Amino acid sequence: MGAVPSTPRWSSAVRPQDTAEFLIGAFVGEKSFPLASDYWKKLLELPLNLHWPAPRVLQACEVSAIVARLMLAIVLPLDSHHVVHGPFLFESMCSGVPPSSYLKAINATYISSVFLKYYIENAKTDNFEELCLSLYENEAVPSNFSRDQNIQNLVMHGVLSFIGKVDVSQHASLLHHELLNFMLVAMSTQLLSGPSPGPKDIHPFIDAAMVQESSLVGLVVHKLLANYITQPRFALNAASYDIFSEGNQPGVLQKVGSAAATRSPLAYSSLHMLLILVHYRKCVLATVKDRSDDSATSDLLLKENTYFSENPFCKALENARDIEFDRVDIEGNAHSGPIVRVPFASLFDTLGMYLADETAVLLLYSLVHGNSDFLEYVLVRTDLDTLLMPMLETLYNASKRTSNQIYMVLIILLILSQDSSFNASIHKLILPSVPWYQERLLRQTSLGSLMVIILIRTVKYNLSKLRDVYLHTNCLAILANMAPHVHRLSAYASQRLISLFDMLSHKYTKLGELKNDKMHIGNGESRGDNLPEDMSTELHIYTDFLRIVLEILNGILTYALPRNPEVVYATMHRQEVFLPFKNHPRFNELLENIFNVLDFFNSRMDAQSMDGEWSVEKVLQVIIINCRSWRGEGMKMFPQLHFTYEQESHPEEFFIPYVWQLVISRRIFSFNPSSINLFPAGLPAEVSISIPQIF
């Protein structure tokens, strides 16, 4: 390295490849080039499709000052004559900075990403000493850069300023994409921490993003949402992604992301970055004064407490308002922070198109849970099938989806079902057909009936495959919220509802018999296992499930019977399934109402003179006629069940690993599996992590 000349020599006789080798050699040589040197300009103007020798790259990775210079080269790119604030003073971009400035910034960004990723993957300490980037003490710095400035803060401010302020044009699109990839790499320090954020976790770059001014944060959130909504499809120069790659070599030489794998790489990069920023939580350790007892004269003690600092990106997403209508302005309420203006109609439509994608489901959850304006907008839309149909199809194909995706869909449906207008409107929307439903032909079915069918199908699938109590509870909670508002439930949906009770009752009865058998064996023999206790727990769970199903039926029959003759017919057709539980202490009050309905309609049937056999049509006709005279005499009015979703006290333990698991599993970002502590790296497609509570 010492033999490398200190200053590049240029002549017409020198071939480009020789020049490239010279520059690359100088890059890892002993000579230190100041930021203002022409060397950096020439290095960053190397062809994008140039393959750098792997040994040179790894050699360069050992010199941390190189990364510091490269990052400053992003913020302070070189034009043909002198150092200027090119790409990140967006005014310069819009006023005619030549395309070569973009190329230099793209190169600097990508090269920085590769080296920074190496340092993070191979960190030797928990506090990321390798990322304490600095310049050499005797190095000259540009006049507009202070040596004591924090490089992470400076770089993150520059990157976010460009993303937030510069339009995504044909020339700037690749730089936007590379900067988002750079942010992804810079924030991947989270992969090295455990799933529970602690005060000792060090994340220099994402913490730097969190302290930016609120106006800039708002611009960035707006741009990331705008990129997702518009799905810009500019041609990205794929050559920029294999500067350091040699064949299929993994690790630091592997490209940062696979941009060609999606229809709009920039849109998906924006979405993933938005989710990372929004769901990050910074754990802070605070020392507070605390008295040792209640005495006013007792000594004060210092006590350490942890808390999570406010996330400005999450706040900005919560403050997003419709560009066409602002309810808050009308009500005269003040905003806390800048308002992000977003076209809700376009966002609604875009989500509807891409909800088959798991990241889109997570974005929808983040909006309906955190942004009351967007939730209200969704609830007043008359085309709810735009969002519901892809989510119901996801539940229908549960075996091909991750459990986390199923959970998110169910939580979204639970949030929506908390609103009575939603529960009423879904039964008014008639679907001509449901092409993806294979079990039978569904024509002219209401969206509400389809939702009931799919939720019951999900419960049945879960009983046979997953056996997840959380999933059961969600499905039944949604059905319970819907029950009092059901309108003209279809025959098939009504049959499925009764068959659900029948299936659960069989499971309940079988568990009771097994428990009794085990207890009998336990009384006769000395056994050390706890099978009866385990079965008692499961039996209790099924008792709760059966009660909820009976409450769902009660909700329909008590509050909506005249509008649901098919539910009455299905109940009458399978009335024998309720008889074994008529005297059950947990069910008898609820079953009294059901038998009251059965007695009423059975007596009306008996009073009919009938020639020949009863057909389905004739029975249903009698039910419809008598529904009109139904007054509900003798029915006990139970309070309507109303399940609500409440996020767990520490949602970051679910969402931070979940977001990064999505990034890794989609091959948007490669990372050394042995370095990942955030989630089990051996399960790239499905991570076993705790699920947030819902009630």
Image (tube, helix red, strand yellow):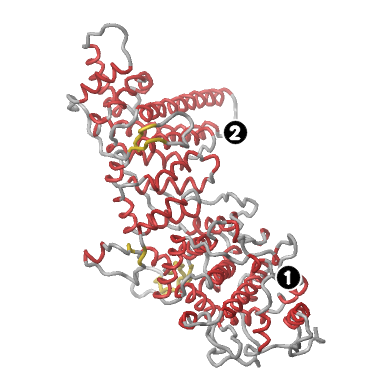
Residue 495 rendering spot, x and y as whole percentages: 38, 26
Q: Name the quadrant containing residue 122.
A: bottom right
Residue identified by numbered label 2: 528
Earlier along the polypeptide chain: callout 1 or callout 2?
Answer: 1
Task: Determine which of the numbered discs, if any, sits on residue 666 in the image.
Answer: none
- Position of residue 59 in the picture relative to residue 584 (left or right): right
Q: Residue furthest front?
A: 12
Tag 1: Cα neighbours inside 10 Å, few (<14), some, or many (≥20)?
Answer: some
Relative to 639, say whether 188 is above or below: below
Secondary structure of the residue carrying numbered label 2: loop
* Residue 580 x %, y %: 38, 20
Q: Quadrant of the N terminus?
A: bottom right
Q: Position of residue 318 (x, y in %)?
A: 37, 63
The part of the image, by quadrant, that contains residue 194 is: bottom right
Front position among marks 1 and 2: 1
Q: Nearer the viewer, residue 435 or 136?
A: 435
* Three-letter amino acid code of the residue under disc 1: His
Q: Pointers 1 and 2 in contact (CB under 8 A)?
A: no
The answer to which of 641 and 52 lies nearer the viewer is 52
Q: 666 above or below 115?
A: above
| 308 or 117: nearer the viewer | 117
Q: Is residue 138 above or below residue 586?
A: below
Q: Which residue in the structure is indicated by mark 1?
A: 51
Alpha carbon distance from label 1 to label 2: 67 Å
On the picture, is 377 further left or further right than 125?
left
